[in-house]
Amino acid sequence: DGMDKLAPAASGCPFHGATAPNGCPVSHEAANFDAFTGPYQIDPPEALRWARAKEPVFYSPRLGYWVVTRYEDVKAVFRDNITFSPSIALEKVTPTSEEANAILRRYDYGMNRTLVNEDEPAHLERRRALLHSFLPEELAHHEPMVRRLTRQYVDRFIDRGEVDLVDEMLWEIPLTVALHFLGVPEEDMGALRQYSIAHTVNTWGRPSPEEQLKVAEAVGNFWQYAGRVLEKMRADPSGHGWMEYAIRRQKEMPDVITDSYLHSMMMAGIVAAHETTANATANALVLLLRNREAWDAICADPSLIPNAAEECLRLSGSIIAWRRLLTADARVGGVDIPKGERLLIVMTSANHDERHFENPDELDIYRDNTTEHLSFGYGSHQCMGKNLARMEMRIFLEELTRRLPHMELVPEQELEYLPNTSFRGPDHLRVRWNPALNPERRDPAILGRKVDFAIGAPERGAIARQMRVAEMRPEAEGVLGLALEDPNGHDLPGWTPGAHIDVTVGEYQRKYSLCGDAGDRRRLQVAIRREDLGRGGSAYIHTAIRPGDIIRVRGPKNHFRLDEGAEQYLLVAGGIGITPIIAMADRLRRLGKSYAIHYAGRSRAAMAFLDRLKRDHGARLHLYPKDEGICLNLPAVIAAASQDAQVYACGPERMLAMLEDAAVCRPERLHVEHFSAAEALLDPSVETPFEVELKDSGLSVPVPADRTLLQALHAAGIDVPSDCGEGLCGSCEVQVLEGEVDHRDKVLSAAERAGSARMMACCSRARGRKLTLAL
Ligand code: HEM
Ligand code: FES
């Protein structure tokens, strides 16, 4: 075809002036990119920073692959596994010598399609047939074992003061768990570790000719070993393991679960299930121990562990890149790539893309979209074992933080990584501590303690930071102002007017809008009205909280954003609803916009911030204290306002309902903040069941009458983020491709609902029997 395609070369040869297979010239950086030495081995996401910035999809002549580096592009490739076939996922990156191939032949080596490298429609048929063992209730059976093993291994070294965690814990436990999960007897653990490393080098590495021979011997042995285990299992497939389950299912569907599949999966499964988890945990420990504050935070509050582990998977996952083959000409990130070309999609680069994650290079264990990382892949091939891996990582971290909070990395060690494109984790990880300070010597009771985590993606509800109450002062009758600071004096995350935080005190959790100065990174301010008829949270804060107390706070987050593009604004507040409104008013004043504030309350004495409002907003402020007989006539205020004015309102439901009626002709200009959404709650006696078809995952999930769509998705292993759980926040939004939605949220406008292209999974349902979602 006349294209100047280059074969991969081991080193040295400059590729200047080379042409990519689409006819375009190869840039200097692309020519120099090497996946096996140098920057990519030292710090993979950093090594591709240039690419994310200026050449997000490039051809690497040294590798012979197109490298995809941005979040959206990597996800788009994962999403379409027809155009971008995974068939090459387990192929050797480096073609082996004839001699090495002869060794493999001698062992009858026949690694073939499993799941991860299978095309449709075979892949999904097989995946669906074998999914059962990965459902949360099935995985729960493995939890006690993970806990027991972790305790046993830690017992062995806890009094020693120093250990190589990789050698003495992180390989063996995931390997044992993996064997147990698969149903393989626990023997030859040492050999299996060596086999796994050989398999990684064989598939994703660049072994020298001599190494290739050794690797081929090990891989050949691994293959034979897998075959022997399979034969034994076939003789009695009654056990609980996933492979035994597959053997049983083979009887019903021999064309879907083939002999070749079983043999290949036996070998691939051992690697998939343990090396990844061991490496991911080692990477997480490196990150957490290097960011001591984060480590200390999870020691103090283990409920942060699931999100911290997830954030570590984002920053430093154990599978950093994966492969796809183009089955047709396609455009990736604006670059035209011919059919037959190969892609290296670099998930770790995607996970560091600032187009998707704020401050992407920072470890922020409170980050609440960290689950959107691509370290488990995405779509119909997404890692089936992710929730087992998560469970193991969390239990390792929970036991280590509780029993060895004083542990640190041995400072002088240099971490070494096996050179390859895809699997990443340190070969060794030495940590040390002073055993005399082991907390269990002082207080043996901690040995019996544990924190159990729900199986699945981290729950946003648990992502809370500790904050100290810096100041408390009355803002009006029954209204208490609270200023909160970071206990260590650090800057707080920025926020925008309309944002709120979720405050957890005792057993209560409440949302409070931020009402201080949005530019102040040291303090967050809220004002809380005592509601004696409420559910008790506000009364508790008013009576039990003292300055200096530590409370748990989630956010800030904003579901009530101020659109700064308009020219005129009408701000309406009822009672304590003034809190987001005052922050908006301050912002509008600073922007020099035209606005008016209408603020109604019981009496002047009960209305918060009057002095501040009068001082800063003077003539724009209109007050309606009820006890003075001054009433807010909403229809009149709306009618008098300019047709272009954007209306922002927060207050009692009664007031918001009246506003909605008054604004009925121009609903798109009305923005309201609700603090509860009672009608979103599920009443199984009146609901009807329906089914959702998930386009990207190739699954069909039933949603019974007594479950929300969100719950049904989680039970099927699909990670959809969620937050409020009652249709207020918009974080559980999913894209609807087909079917009519019964919207019950408070997030979407009437126009957005009419389009039916989006829905909130936590509360909305199908009108008919079925919905198709882009998930
Ligand atoms: C697939 C990562 C642990 C079983 C995958 C894929 C990735 C991945 C990137 C390919 C996804 C795609 O093509 O979209 C990881 C990581 C792990 C981990 C980072 C640990 C932290 C596990 C465990 C198991 C497992 C513990 C088994 C118990 C599988 C299977 C597939 C897969 C069966 C193939 C799914 C399919 O193609 O349908 N994993 N994995 N993984 N993983 Fe994992
Ligand atoms: Fe908040 Fe669904 S989780 S809208």
Image: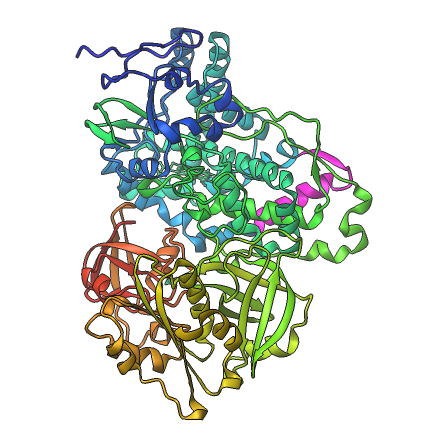
Identify which residue is drawn at 47% across, 22% down.
420
649 vs 27, nearest the viewer: 649
Identify which residue is drawn at 32% across, 43% down.
379
Taking the image in four quarters, ligand 1 sits in the one at: top left
Instruction: Please provide percent x and percent y for residue 483.
Output: 60, 66
Seen in the image, is 475 located left or right of residue 109?
right
Residue 770 lies, with reference to residue 193, above or below; the image says below
Residue 516 lies, with reference to residue 88, above or below; the image says below
The answer to whether residue 89 is seen in the rendering is: no
Seen in the image, is 626 located left or right of residue 695?
right
The answer to whether residue 624 is seen in the rendering is: yes
Is 33 contained in the magenta span?
no
Instruction: Please provide percent x and percent y for residue 603.
Output: 48, 87
Residue 689 lies, with reference to residue 21, above or below; the image says below
Instruction: Please provide percent x and percent y for residue 617.
Output: 44, 71
From the image, which quarter does the N terminus lie in?
top left
Residue 605 lies, with reference to residue 58, above or below; the image says below
Q: Identify the image quadrant of residue 468.
A: bottom right
Identify which residue is drawn at 59% across, 24% down.
416
Magenta part mainly helix, strand or loop? helix
Q: Identify the image quadrant of residue 449.
A: bottom right
The stretch of residues the image draws in magenta is 144-164
Instruction: Please provide percent x and percent y for residue 125.
Output: 26, 42
Identify which residue is drawn at 45% across, 37% down.
352
Q: Identify the image quadrant of residue 662.
A: bottom left
410 vs 118, nearest the viewer: 410
- For this orientation, the residue located farthest to the left is 1
Is 148 contained in the magenta span?
yes
